[in-house]
Amino acid sequence: MSKSLKGSLLLLLTAFIWGTAFVFQRVGMDFIEPFTFNGVRNIVGAVALLPVIFLLSKLNISSKGEESDNFSEYTYIPGGIACGVILFAASSLQQIGLQYTTAGKAGFLTALYMVLVPIVQIFMRKYAGAKVWLCVIIATFGTYLLSVKDGFTVENGDIYVMLCAVVYTFHIIVIDYFSPKADAVKMSCVQFLTCGIISLAVAFIFETPTLDKVINAVIPILYTGIMSSGVAYTLQIIGQRMSPAPVACIVMSLESVFALLTGAVFLSESMTLREGIGCGLVFIAVILSQVDFRLVISYIKTSKEKLK
C-alpha cells in the first residue's frame, strides 16, 4: 500500500468521525451554549490524549514527522498553539452556525475549504495539478447543489459555517507546515488545550456555563471531545504528512457526505434529489482524486499489446 493511499485512508476515517460528529454537535446545542460546548469538548480531547502520550513514551513509539530531527524537540508547542487559536475561531463559527442550519448543510459548507486551500497555496508557490482542480470543481458544484437554494438565498447559519470554512483553510495550511516537523499526538494535545482554554474564557464572559448544562450535554461532549477532537484531529495531522494538502482536503470533504447521511438517519433531516446528486458529485471527486491516471493509461496500453 502506497504512502499516499495510507494517508488518504486515515483522512477518510477522519472525515467519517467528523461527519457523524455534526449530529452530536447539533444535539448538544439543545442543552448548552456554543463556547461552553467547544471549551469543554476540547479540554476532554486534550485529557483523552494524555494516556496515549504516556503509553507511546513507555513503548518508545514516536509519532514525530519525517523532518522532526531537523527541528527542536518542542516544535509541537508553537505548532499546537497556532493550530489551537485557529481551531478556536473555526469551531466557534461552526458551532454558532449549527444553531441556525442543519447538520447536513453545515457539513457540506464546512467542506468549502477544499476549494480555498489550493487557491491560497498558489500565493505560497505551491501549485495543484489539473486533476486536483477538476476534482475541486466537481466537489464545489456538488456543494452548491446541496447548500444554495433557488434564487441564491443563503440562511444566516450558512454564513457562519462558510466563514468557518475560510478559517479551516488556514488551519489545514498551518498543519501542513508543522505536521512533518512535530510530534503529532503532542501537537494535537496542545492544540485542544489551547482551543479549550480560549473557548472557556470567552464562555465565562458571554455565556452562563453551569455544571447542569454540561451534564445534560455529556454524551455529545464526550463523543465530540474524544472522537472528533482527540482521535480525528490527530489522524488528520498524521494523514496530512502522507498526502498533499489539496488532495487531503478533497478526501476530508467526505465529512459532508457522512454528515448528511447521519443527519438523515438520526435527526430525520430530509434529503432531496438535488441534494443527493450533490452528495454523489463530492463522492466522485474524492474517488477521482485518488486515481493515478498515468497507471490507468499504462495498464490499458499494456492490455492492448497483450491482446495483439
Image (cartoon, rainbow, N blue to C red):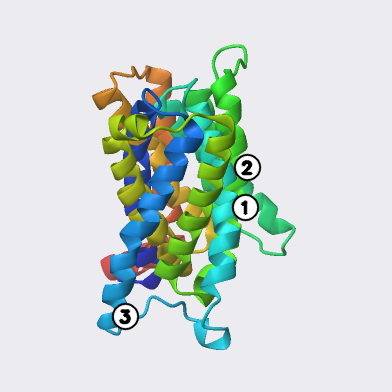
| Label 1 – label 3 distance at C-alpha | 31 Å
* Residue 126 visible in the picture: yes
Nearest the viewer among 28 and 122 is 28
Please, what is the three-letter code of the amino acid marked with disc 1?
Answer: Phe
Nearest the viewer among 162 and 306 is 162
| Label 1 – label 2 distance at C-alpha | 7 Å
Residue furthest to the top in view is 151
Q: Which residue carries the number 1 mark?
A: 170
Instruction: State which quadrant residue 306 falls in.
Output: bottom left
Residue furthest to the bottom in view is 69
Viewer-nearest of discs 3 and 2: 3
Q: Which residue carries the number 2 mark?
A: 166
Tell me whether circle 1 and circle 2 mark residues in contact (CB < 8 Å). yes
Instruction: State which quadrant residue 268 falls in.
Output: top left
Kindly identify the residue that appears in the image at 56 percent across and 44 percent down. 201
Q: Which residue carries the number 3 mark?
A: 57
| Label 3 – label 2 distance at C-alpha | 36 Å
Kindly identify the residue that appears in the image at 56 percent across and 12 percent down. 150
Badge number at residue 6: none
Please, what is the three-letter code of the amino acid marked with disc 3?
Answer: Ser
Looking at the rendered image, the quarter that the C terminus falls into is bottom left
Q: Is residue 299 left or right of residue 200?
A: left
Please, what is the three-letter code of the amino acid marked with disc 2?
Answer: Val
Q: Which of the two labelled residues, at mark 3 and mark 2, occupies the earlier sequence position?
A: 3
Could you classify mark 2 by the number of other residues whose Cα lies within 10 Å: few (under 14), some (14-19), or many (20 or more)? some
